[in-house]
Amino acid sequence: MCRLIRFGLIALLLTALTLPLAHSLDKQPAGVYHARRVALAAKLHGGVAILFAAQEPVLDFMPYRQDEDFYYLTGWTDPGAALLIASDDAQAASPRTYGEILFLPTRNLRLEKYSGIKPDAATPGAAKTAGVDAVQPMAQLPVVLNRLIGEANRGLSGNLWAQPAAPEAKALLQFNGATFGSSSMPPARDVTSMIAQLRVVKDAGEIELLRKASDASIAGQRAMMKAVKPGVTERTVAGKMTAAWFEAGCERPSYAPIVGSGINSTILHYGENSRTIEDGDIVVVDAACEYSMYAADITRTVPANGRFTERQREIYNIVLASQQAAIDAFVSGKSKINDRDRKDPDSLDNAAYNYINTHGKDLHGQPLGQYWLHGLGHIVGINVHDPAEYPAVLKPGMVFTIEPGVYIPEEKLGVRIECTFLVGEDGKLIDLTAALPHTAEEVEAAMQGK
């Protein structure tokens, strides 16, 4: 009987290894990722790029998230892999054309009992499943790189690209230096800067994922508006949103949820979420989720008891109008975000700041501009703060936030309103968060279940 059971388990394991690898995330077609790799290769001009996936956490309560650039180029979610992209090189000893290899780590049968079966290079159909030209064992990576360096006319000096912070890249270069009888090799160039240029403009598939992330985040914000009441803790509100995100198919928050009530509403990145909400408080809720690695970013400000006080409503409406001022000033291909140059007429930051600074006063009769402490927005994508060079000129296909705020500690009064926008192909703004209550009246109605 024991032998039969053992045989059955072995058969089940072999069957699992021959099945297509499961992916819990919504992925784009393999051709999309391949096109991104080819686009990166075109920027290397004869160079070679090596990227490493994120490593599996040591402890099971530690979060795992794939390296963003690695995912952008491959759609691969498993840990411990490496990707090599070799661009065309007519000067090599053997003229080289584009090539790509996904290197997979050796299976660890003991750890797989805890974390599940991982594919390796011997897994049937691995290359097709991964959507890459070739798959090899991780042990072959230094061998392949050694050959490419040897064949290159100038030894790839200055044209080897990697992630600067990856310890695996540093170890690989040191080992390859030793194979050539050298204690070191020239440092690799930063491949993430090249990939950042590709990530700025989103394709249609990315935009769809960003829409789904926004929709799920809106569900969480609506749950928040029903949950905020005097006597409820900030953490309870964060938990209600988290549950809504998971129910909508999201895998994690985009960032640590911020639920700041009372004086905490004036702390920009407040994250303790430990205070009990009191009657008369205003509550800033900056919280959203990721859908298949793509992030949303939303902030709403609500009154604890469902009704803004006169002063709260005044500041809320000023912040809301400043956001609208930025929207009205937007011109595709010209307007800039995160531009604090007060003399720049193309700065959306200026459009919002000028409104805030010319409407309303603090308790001492001073303008409110001094109480806005951050930039107007940022680019959104695989990261809630996707890489970009700021000030960023906004063009079709870019997704970004507009999030003015006023924070007055003396009054325990903070207001931030944040929406995520897509620049459409026609150059017009599309609010990905338009379905969420926005005006003070809409927020109050939602809190009262209307």
Image (spheres, helix red, strand yellow):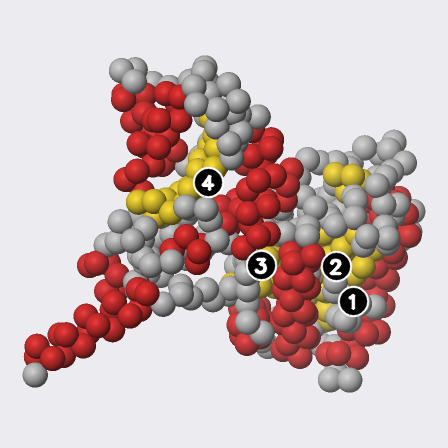
Dot 1: within a 10 Å radius of its alpha carbon, few (fewer than 14), some, or many (20 or more) residues?
some
| Residue linked to disc 4 | 100
User: Looking at the image, do the residues carrying marks 4 and 3 touch, with CB atoms under 8 Å apart?
Assistant: no
Rounded to the nearest angstrom, the CA distance separating label 4 from label 2 is 39 Å
Upstream in sequence: badge 4 or badge 1: 4
User: With 186 as the anchor, is 398 left or right in this view?
Assistant: right
Upstream in sequence: badge 2 or badge 1: 2
Under circle 4, the secondary element is strand
16 over 364 or under it: above or below: below
Single out the mark in the foreground, 4 or 3: 4
Q: Quadrant of the N terminus?
A: bottom left
Amino acid found under the numbered disc labelled 3: Gln
Dot 2: within a 10 Å radius of its alpha carbon, few (fewer than 14), some, or many (20 or more) residues?
many
Under circle 1, the secondary element is loop
In the drawing, what numbered circle is on residue 419?
2
Q: Position of residue 314 (x, y in %)?
A: 86, 62
| Residue linked to disc 3 | 28
Q: Position of residue 170 (x, y in %)?
A: 37, 30
Q: Is residue 104 visible?
A: yes
Amino acid found under the numbered disc labelled 2: Cys
Rounded to the nearest angstrom, the CA distance separating label 4 from label 1 is 41 Å
306 over 299 or under it: above or below: below
Camera-side residue of 427 and 431: 427
Q: Quadrant of residue 411?
A: bottom right
Upstream in sequence: badge 4 or badge 3: 3
User: Looking at the image, do the residues carrying marks 2 and 1 touch, with CB atoms under 8 Å apart?
Assistant: yes
